[in-house]
Amino acid sequence: MSVLATRIGQLDLANPIMPASGTFTEDLADVFDLGILGAHVLKTFTPELRTGNPTPRVCDLTGGMMNAIGIPSKGLEHFLTQTLPFWVRYDVPLVVSISAHSYDAFARLAAAVTVPGVAAIEANISCPNIEADGRAFAVRADTTGQVVAQLRGATDLPLWVKLSPNTGEPVEVAQAAEAAGADALVVANTLLGMAIDVETRQPRLGNVMGGISGPAIKPVALRMTYQAASATRIPVIGCGGISTVADVVEFLIAGATAVQVGTATFQSPTTMRRLLAGLEDWLAAHDVASVRDLRGTVALPDAPVAAMLT
Amino acid sequence: MNAIAKDAILTPPRYRCAEVLCAVRANDVVNTDYRLLTLDAPPEVLECAPGQFFQLLCPGTADDQPFLRRPMSIYDFDAQAGSLRFLYKVTGAGTRGLATLRPGDRLNVLGPLGQGFSMHDNWQRLMLVARGVGLATLAPLARLAQARGRQLTAICSARAPEFVMSVEHFRNCGAEVIVVTDTDGSSAPDALHALIEARIASGGVDAFYTCGSARIARMLQGIGAAHGIPGEIAVEQQMACGLGMCQACVRPFRDGDKVVHRRVCREGPVFPLAGVVA
């Protein structure tokens, strides 16, 4: 196995660098060869057609950005006939991100995307659940367990569950996903925030609130990665503010098996290509034989505080 | 379902744009509002079309740390001279950062991006109507019109005479230039409308190009519809990636009796004038 090769459950990856959902489409092939990536993670789509949120959909922050794009979706048929055929040209595992507003619709979509060419499903459970007063599935352990169990019953593909930082019980949610049959956890989605233009007094996003991403939320995502990796036995894919080789290494040490890069690609579309080369150099310079040897190697103080895990 | 076999395609698509570091050749004050940035740029980013734009990674200052890139339309590109120029107005965190650049500094640019202007064979008599910094976006178009031997009238609008950009450039490209300003009232809707109608009546106009003013865009849509004159417009929207991935920069467009959302960075920034909701 090569220095960078890793494995998420039954899925072999050539390297641990992959895009985060929502920041990656075929448009990035305009900038570099997407065949070098460890996996391709597509933008979330939903069963129904969605136009997305009113503009402005993004705003700039110190050390990051905030978005309320609203998951514009062209639906299942478009995915199967237009999106999927593009990606088949690459010999890279294709991870399809899906979402829905009810348990049943979520499960039916998972079954519908269980087709040749798809290597894994990433369940975006941060969207509102209309069967729980519009609360996101991912904020509670019980709703997370229920939706993951439904998805597990609907597909034999590896099932990655993307967690949300907008919960007070990250460990319980992670364990609920594992118990219900998740093959891996993606940790984590954007952090809910808000910004106001003080001159106009208007919210800086058309949707009023939005998800913060970028380096500003990296410590939150790293903390959750550590918590999820410590409290479950399934692989964790770190995601949140990763933009440098040191960030990648930090998430691996915290317990991640691979990482997703999102907002950094908006700032510099060649980020993932740079991280791949840089990670190999880092491993060589630190005499680490395999990227797999870094996982979960944080040097904790002698008497860690148990409460930090909950 | 998966109709295309693995071996059926498959050369990777050609790289449409590049992310490169450019050295600043000059960053000159044009007037109280505008600056002109000239970069030494490599050949891989200089196959541009008029109307295309770049995403600039603007430097931070003591007060601002812009995170996202800022889209900026191309003012001038010259593959032989290896130069790329942007005419910008200092308005926010990104452009305040750009204003701090000194010769020899380096700037990370991504481009060229988006779809530029078209110039169909039967568009021989061109009329450009633009305002403010929108005039910068249309500057490369004038050079293309000259290269293709088209007749060009440039109506340049601004709040005061000192803020009318690109007049010399348009004249050097062989255009007839008409300056209208708020100061003397010549840029007012009625006056501008009469001016354009008079030009259509006297010399004829085959196509309009515009940028920088929703009011002018609406006026040209009306005049265009009345006379059957097509046109194109370059529009703006807040952007994140600039490549088409994030779906942030959508705007509504009329498509028959439907309203559809299109990405300014990818399907635009140049669109047919008739469909724009201005």
Image (tube, rainbow, N blue to C red):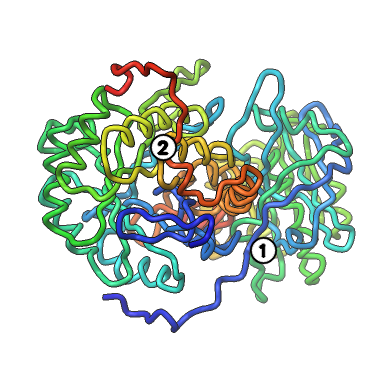
Left or right, B153 with reference to A261: right
Q: Position of residue B7 (x, y in %)?
A: 44, 83
Q: Amino acid at mark 2?
A: Gly
Left or right, A155 with reference to A266: left
Depth check: A292 or B252 in front? A292
* Residue A56 visible in the snapshot: no
Residue positioned 56% across, 40% down in the render: A243
Given the image, what chain letter belongs to the residue carrying mark 1? B
To which residue does mark 1 refer?
Answer: B205
Left or right, A274 with reference to A176: right
Figure disc tally: 2
Q: CA distance from mark 1 to mark 2?
A: 70 Å
Query: Is there CB contact under 8 Å for labels 1 and 2?
Result: no
Residue positioned 66% across, 50% down in the render: B110
Depth check: A255 or A208 in front? A255
Work out whether B202 lies above or below B196. Answer: below
Residue positioned 66% across, 56% down in the render: B52
Tag nearer the camera, 1 or 2: 2
To which residue does mark 2 refer?
Answer: A296
Count residues near mark 1 (Cα–Cα under 10 Å), then give few for <14, some for 14-19, many for 20+: many
Numbered disc 1: secondary structure: loop
Count residues near mark 2 (Cα–Cα under 10 Å), then give few for <14, some for 14-19, many for 20+: some
Determine the image quadrant of residue A229.
top left
Residue positioned 33% across, 19% down in the render: A308
Q: Position of residue B112 (x, y in %)?
A: 67, 56
Rendered-image quadrant of the C terminus of chain A: top left
Determine the image quadrant of residue A305.
top left
Q: Amino acid at mark 1?
A: Val
Determine the image quadrant of residue A109.
bottom left
Depth check: A211 or A280 in front? A280
Furthest residue in direction bottom, as rendered? B8
